[in-house]
Amino acid sequence: MNSKPLTYDSLKTVLLYMDPNTRILLSSRAPSIHATEKTVPLKLEELKIGRHLIRVNGIFYKYGVYQVDQRGKLPYQVSGSSKINFKWTCDVDEFGIPDYITRDGGMLPGNNGRRELTLFGEYDAEIIPTNEGRLKKLKKKLAVAKREDKQMSNRNSDKLRSRMTRSEKLRIERIVKEESEYRKNGIERMENELLPFENKRKNKRPKFEIHVTKKKGDSLSQVIERIKYTGDLHKAGKSLFEFMFGKRLFLIEVKELTLLQGCSTPSDFKMRIKHLDFSDDGPLELEQFKPIIHESSFPLEKLTIHKNYNAEKAMNHEIIVNSKLLQLDGIVTLSHPFLQNLQNQKVHASIKELDFFKSEVFISLIRSWVETNKPNGTCFTFSFWGCELKEKYCKEALTLIREQIDGAMRGNKCVNIPMRTSTKLKISYRRYENNDHLIEMAVVPS
């Protein structure tokens, strides 16, 4: 059977309908099609960009710094979040010392009079002014942990030699194994935290590499690329973004773009999006993401923000104001001015105040909608964050509204309030998710 290579047009058609992840991986393995792949429109259901990670249609790509020369051990990741003190590391120096320590003049965290975790993830009130003193105390803690692990292992061995039934012995063996693994993992993490300082003391320079891994669901991560580490992980991250999404002939089409708190924002590609999902612990700075979002995306079909929304000035950003649907998720403190100043026609907010719907804030919001004659189609919905909104509570809230708002009339699971035009304000409740409910206030034709 004769086989012929695909023509240029046929290859473009195949790439157009190929799964985006397969397509990107194939392009990395077959340089001959790389240029052609860039000329074919790329459409994604979802794209997530975060700290040292990219997720495309459910598949995670992560990049990190690994030490690869520890004898008898698998490569050990030194970047990212520490599993013992939760500090975040991007880059390390020639000995493996994390950048958050280097930025602090080389001083180890903790033991400084502030409520700051030590290298081992503990609060220690003792003030130790020197690195040598702090390292000495950490080494003592490590020695104590090793001694306690050995003593516990000996006691468990004695326990397992005692007389017991087979089922009891199997149960004890399982518990002992789990406890032993937990202790040994803790000890290994402590050793890894101290290792860079031992390297510096011995003038030892480990070998580091950047590994790019791929992972889907609960499967194991697969290393798809190994790169020499030159001290700048973000540069490698930008190269990965550039390879996957840069220099394309057509705009990237993305239904849902999720932006998590990150170290740097890629800026070498443009995309057209419908839904932007934004999460960040810092200030709400949407302006930094405008370079990668094409102007034809605005107004957004939906904007989801996971934050504490106390900063009203930040909420006046044009991206937020003009979004067709604004969804506020997380711990939200809702004041009357905040809610009244929201200019979006459709808003959904998850809130934490259990008595919000029985508060003067909610009653004042209802009155202001009626007084300002909110336009037809305006709709705000509310659910509780972190707990269920029960039907009984919804009924009580509607009863209170009828009692406090002049002209309010009872309906089926709702309260109707006449407005000056041929519209009415309808406040109702309905099932939301599982046994949860949401409360909706909407301006509808009367």
Image (spheres, rainbow, N blue to C red):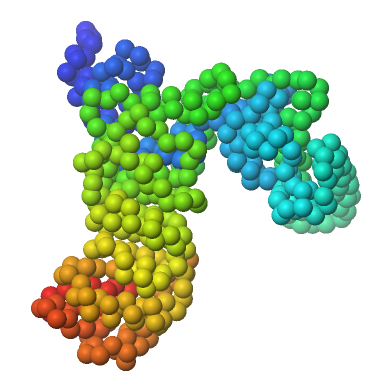
Give the percent coordinates (x, y) of residue 45: 30, 42
- Residue 336 in the image: state x and y as whole percent: 37, 73
Q: Quadrant of the C terminus?
A: bottom left
* 387 horizontally vs 372: left or right: right
Residue 432 in the image: x percent, y percent?
34, 68
Most distant residue in the top direction: 2
Task: Report the residue at 24% width, 68% height from top.
Answer: 379
Image-quadrant location for residue 268:
top left
Question: In the depicted view, which residue is nearer to us: 35 or 15?
Answer: 35
User: Residue 268, relative to residue 255: is it above or below?
Assistant: above
- Residue placed most toward the observer, 16 or 106: 106
Residue situated furthest left in the rendering: 422
Find residue 58 and report its image quarter. top left
Q: In the drawing, does residue 73 fall left or right of residue 341? A: right
Whether residue 190 is situated above or below residue 169 in the rendered picture: above
Q: Is residue 391 visible?
A: no
Residue drawn at x 31%, y 12% is 32
Up-down relation of residue 240 to residue 395 (above or below): above
Residue sitting at x 33%, y 36%:
292
Residue drawn at (22%, 75%) of the image = 372
Lateral position of residue 133 relative to residue 432, left or right: right
The x, y position of residue 407, in whole percent, is 22, 90
Quarter holding the N terminus?
A: top left
